[in-house]
Amino acid sequence: MVIYQYPFRSKFEFGTKYGVKGEKWSCGYHCGIDLKSKNHGGDGLVYPIAPGVVESINAHGNSYGRHLCIRHNDGMVSLYAHLEFITVNRGQQVAFTTKLGREGTTGNSTGVHLHLELHQDKYKYPAKIDPRQWIEDHLKEVEDLEIKKLTVYVDGKPKVIDAVFQEGTNYIKLRDFAEVLGSQVKYDNVTERIDIIKKK
């Protein structure tokens, strides 16, 4: 089984979800997910969600702005759109650690973010797969990740939970935990303390 990761290795937040209805999309819904890093504590550098080959660059219309597609070993094709710049070439082999470029606001975009789509077998608009759900179902296996017992604080009260530790910054499973609580995750690099802050 091909394993996947999120396209940022630094801090990021989720924006518009897959499937959101809207007239501004010609298919009538948002057929990818939006992720935001550079203006949310991260470096904005974009990485492949899985190893593969750069299949195309800027091949699918001006709406995506600067964009590229990667074909993965399981036949899936991922698309990365609205990039500020691209640092790979068509036909290049890419690994989890290959920098693809940086999130931007090129094309039809209302702010700095990465638009990510996932297609089965080949690019075909509109995408029919929720990238976030796919990534969550195919996350990097335990040997590539560190599982930690963490104390998180909900309204100042400690709770001990298991979490996935990736590259020293992202506690991926906490994102779902925070969403359920209607909360934000605040992480302190020095003390490794995580605060769950409920949104008002």
Image (tube, helix red, strand yellow):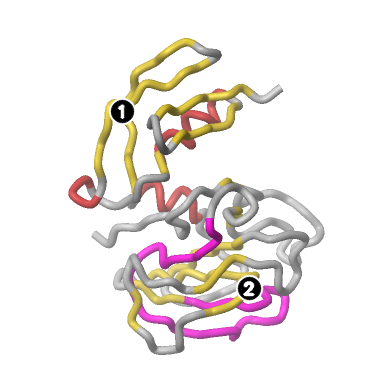
Mark 1 — residue?
162
Q: Which residues are magenta?
A: 43-69
Amino acid type, callout 2: Glu
Is residue 50 located in the magenta-colored stretch of the structure?
yes
Asked if labels 1 and 2 touch by Cβ distance under 8 angstroms, the answer is no
Is residue 177 inside the magenta stretch? no
Q: Is residue 104 left or right of residue 69?
A: right
CA neighbours of label 1 inside 10 A, class few (<14), some (14 to 19), many (20+): few
Local secondary structure at mark 2: strand
Please report the residue visible at 59 percent of the width from the left and 27 percent of the height from the top: 183
Residue 53 is labelled as none
- Measuring 54% from the left and 49% from the top, which residue is drawn there? 12
Residue 117 sits above or below residue 6 on the image: below
Q: Position of residue 37 (x, y in %)?
A: 57, 54
User: Mark 2 — residue?
Assistant: 84
The image position of residue 154, as x and y in percent, is 50, 17
Q: Tell me residue 178's x, y (percent).
A: 52, 29
Quarter-of-image position of residue 63: bottom right
Q: Quadrant of the C terminus?
A: top right
Taking the view exactly as shown, the residue that stands out farthest to the right is 23
- Report the number of numbered marks: 2
Q: Residue at x 66, y 50 (%)?
A: 16
Q: Nearer the viewer, mark 2 or mark 1?
A: 2
Where in the figure is residue 176, as x and y percent of width and height? Answer: 48, 34
Residue at the (54%, 53%) spot, across then down: 42
Residue sitting nearer the eye, 75 or 139: 139
Neighbour tally class for label 2: few under 14, some 14-19, many 20 plus, Cα within 10 Å? some
Front one among 11 and 25: 11
On screen, 156 above or below 100?
above
Cα separation, mark 2 vs mark 1, equals 36 Å
Q: Earlier in the sequence, mark 2 or mark 1?
A: 2
